Image: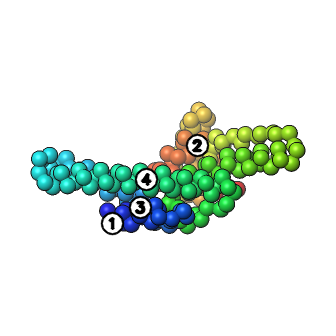
Amino acid sequence: MYDELYEAWIKERETTEIQALPKDFYVKLAGYIKKMKEESRMLDDKTVRAKLLRREADNVKKMVKEIIELRREKTLKKATDGKPVAKEALTYEEEKLLGEVSPSLESYQTLLKGILGGRSPRIEVKQKPKTMILRFIQEIPAIIGADMKPYGPFKPEDTASLPIENARILIKQGVAVEVETK
């Protein structure tokens, strides 16, 4: 994993374009760092192996921090300039983050265009949805939602709109999946 990280770090530093990373790159990195921490705990701090492992961990942390900062800057720059960001180059986590930031950046572009067009600025803040639409994969009994209302019972292939807090738990448990809405 160190070689893959090093190669990604070099590529990201050398170019102005965001470089393609595997979708699960950050997940693999987190596992790699966790493994180093576990190994480090098992070693005597005075051994050569412990010192090498500490140095490797320091290098990894520096590279990860710089990669994330560079990618954030490149992504935000493109989005701010109104240019499309190649989703195939982003990790799963970056796609989610960009999806949350893009509407705000688009609002700034709309504000700018309105002012330059001589129109009075009007900002409409879109409320984040308080519910999520789910499709159930497994049968589950009725539940009381975070809003204290009863929901269910549900059978496989049922769909329902539930409070986000409950929806996330059900998705994490693998009993339901989010229905994409546009």
**Amino acid type at mark 2:** Ile
Front label number (3 vs 2): 3
The image shows residue 69, relative to residue 10, as above or below, that is above
First of labels 2, 4 by sequence position? 4
Front label number (3 vs 1): 3
First of labels 3, 2 by sequence position? 3
Residue shown at the point (59%, 32%) measured from the top left: 148
Q: Which residue is mark 3?
A: 9
Report if residue 36 is visible in the image: no
- Compute the Cα span from label 4 to label 1: 16 Å
Report if residue 75 is visible in the image: yes
Q: Which residue is mark 1?
A: 3
**Amino acid type at mark 1:** Asp
In depth, the one of 92 and 61 nearer the eye is: 61
Residues at marks 4 and 1 touching, judged by CB atoms closer than 8 Å: no
- Classify residue 101 as left or right of residue 32: right
Q: Which residue is mark 2?
A: 164
From the top left corner, tell me how far across and down residue 32 is, in percent.
31, 57
Front label number (2 vs 1): 1
The image shows residue 24, relative to residue 168, as above or below, that is below
Q: Which residue is mark 4?
A: 66
Q: Does dot 1 land on a helix, a strand or a loop?
A: helix
Residue shown at the point (71%, 42%) measured from the top left: 126
Q: Does dot 3 land on a helix, a strand or a loop?
A: helix
- Corner quadrant of residue 87: bottom right
- Viewport quadrant of the N terminus: bottom left
**Amino acid type at mark 3:** Trp
From the top left corner, tell me how far across and down residue 44 is, in percent.
12, 47
- Compute the Cα span from label 3 to label 1: 10 Å
